[in-house]
Amino acid sequence: MTTAPVVDLRIEGSVISERSAPGARLDAREGERVIEADGLVALTGLVDLHTHLREPGFEQSETVLTGTRAAAAGGFTTVFPMANTSPVADTAGVVEQVQALGDAAGYATVRPIGAVTEDLAGERLSEIGAMAQSRAAVRVFSDDGKCVHDPLLMRRALEYVKTFDGVVAQHAQDPRLTEGAQMNEGALSSELGLQGWPAVAEESIIARDVLLAEHVGARLHICHLSTAGSVEVIRWAKARGVQVTAEVTPHHLILTDELARTYDPRYKVNPPLRSDRDVRALRAAVSDGVIDIIATDHAPHPVEAKECEWDAAAFGMVGLESALPIAILTLIEGGHASWAEVEQLLSQRPAAIGRLAGHPAELAEGHSADLVLVNPAASSVFDLARLHGRSTNSPFLGMELPGRIHTTIRRGILTVDDGVLVDAAQVAAAAESAR
Ligand SMILES: NC(=O)N[C@@H](CC(=O)O)C(=O)O
Ligand SMILES: [Zn+2]
Ligand SMILES: [Zn+2]
């Protein structure tokens, strides 16, 4: 399954202190814990550049604690939570609060994303500089959930983040073209009588923003690409040398708008599930490097918001625990990527885009001990027991999925041990003594 050589790693404190030569063993010392990793694949800890942790304000959906437990269970060691909380993460105070909650919980490194505009209202820029200079040292800014629609504000945001090597992550959705939209626009939306969401609503914003990013000379990141046309716009922009990066979610790599036939709101998401042709284009774009990363867009919602009629239901799916299994199924088993490429897509490149300090470039001596061990051969039905957050709105429940997370270690702290999430008190105590 993997061509990587078998090695032993020694972890001391938060750091990898020793790596054996390929095929050789390290001697376990007195008091050391030995993890048998035969048959497992080791990756640098997964990094999610697009997570909704919902705290402060929507704790009935998720909290920093419950969301980072879900993250650890999925093999993630760092998450970048989006700013659409209440209050919105548009000040230094809120981003510092969210980061502190993450530090205390200990399950994952939490690197808050700051809002581009005050209260996500799209009218005035937020305190971008203050958030960048705060203890949270914010480098990623996004109004995710909403599009920064005003081109002048978008230009100013790009100019601002450029001064400290930040990035604007755009939720590309033209609001006028998607008023009342409920699902992908096409023959099926007409047939089902649901208001359509045209591909051009996404593609036109991406086209505008890559031109703005080129004009300003700033970094732009596009959230959750969902259409074949978006891939072509990004391909064109990259060929011109625009500093643009693109993400795709696991669900957009496998699910299609046909699922709307069920009228089951578990399949209602922003951007909507698209056609089979779009799914194939997205997979191909991952293989050929036009898409840089996979991000979960983990979007927990309480049952009331999902067990209702399609039109009334909230947009969003939980995704932290299913991300690696879906990547294995669609990319590795689908022949689109190797394990080394999956490590790039789910760990190395999201860390680089988010300017994540201290992330291990590889599992080698001197690097931070952030890693995940996954059993690629283990395949099982994805059920409720696999979800560790507060919400259960996963579209993958009941599906047979490959890949079990065996071990997650974040900065030397064991968070998943032999497939079991480590107790919250134990992880918090370990995080406390590491500080
Ligand atoms: N993806 C979604 O369907 N929902 C997200 C918002 C977003 O990512 O745009 C949410 O916050 O619930
Ligand atoms: Zn979004
Ligand atoms: Zn989102």
Image: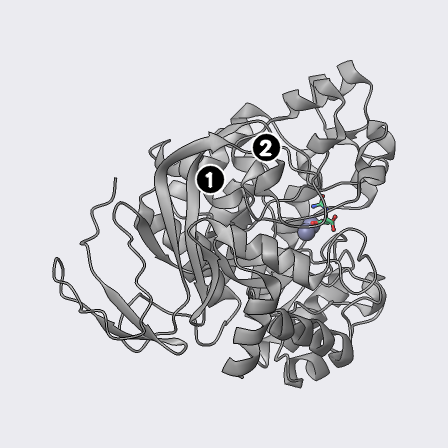
For numbered disc 1, what is the local secondary structure? helix
Residue 59: where, in percent of width, then height?
80, 57
Is residue 131 positioned above or below 252 on the image? below
Height in image: 344 above or below 359? above
In the displayed orientation, state which residue is furthest to the front. Answer: 30
Can you say which quadrant of the picture contains the C terminus? Answer: bottom right
Q: Quadrant of residue 287?
A: top left
Left or right? Give the position of 161 relative to 8.
right
On residue 75, the disc is: none
**Above or below, comparing residue 270 to residue 255 in the picture:** below
Q: Residue at x 50, y 51 (%)?
A: 420
Q: Ligand 1: does it lie within 8 Å of the C-beta at label 1?
A: no
| Label 2 SS | loop
Q: How is the image coloured?
A: one colour
Mark 1: which amino acid?
A: Pro
Q: Which residue is mark 1?
A: 325
**Residues at discs 1 and 2 in contact (Cβ within 8 Å):** yes
Residue beneath the point at 64% across and 74% down: 104
- The image shows a total of numbered marks equal to 2
Considering depth in this image, is 284 or 304 the residue closer to the camera? 304
Q: Nearer the viewer, residue 121 or 219?
A: 121
* Residue 134 in the image, given as x and y percentages of width and height: 67, 84
Q: Position of residue 220 (x, y in %)?
A: 58, 62
Q: Residues within 10 Å of mark 2 (few under 14, many from 20)?
A: many
The residue lying furthest to the top in this view is 191
The answer to whether one can see residue 13 in this image is yes
The residues bearing labels 1 and 2 have C-alpha atoms spaced at a distance of 10 Å
| Amino acid type of the residue that numbered disc 2 sits on in the rendered structure | Phe
- Badge 1 or badge 2: first in the primary sequence: 1
The answer to whether 347 appears left or right of 150 in the picture is left
Which residue has dot 2 on it?
A: 396
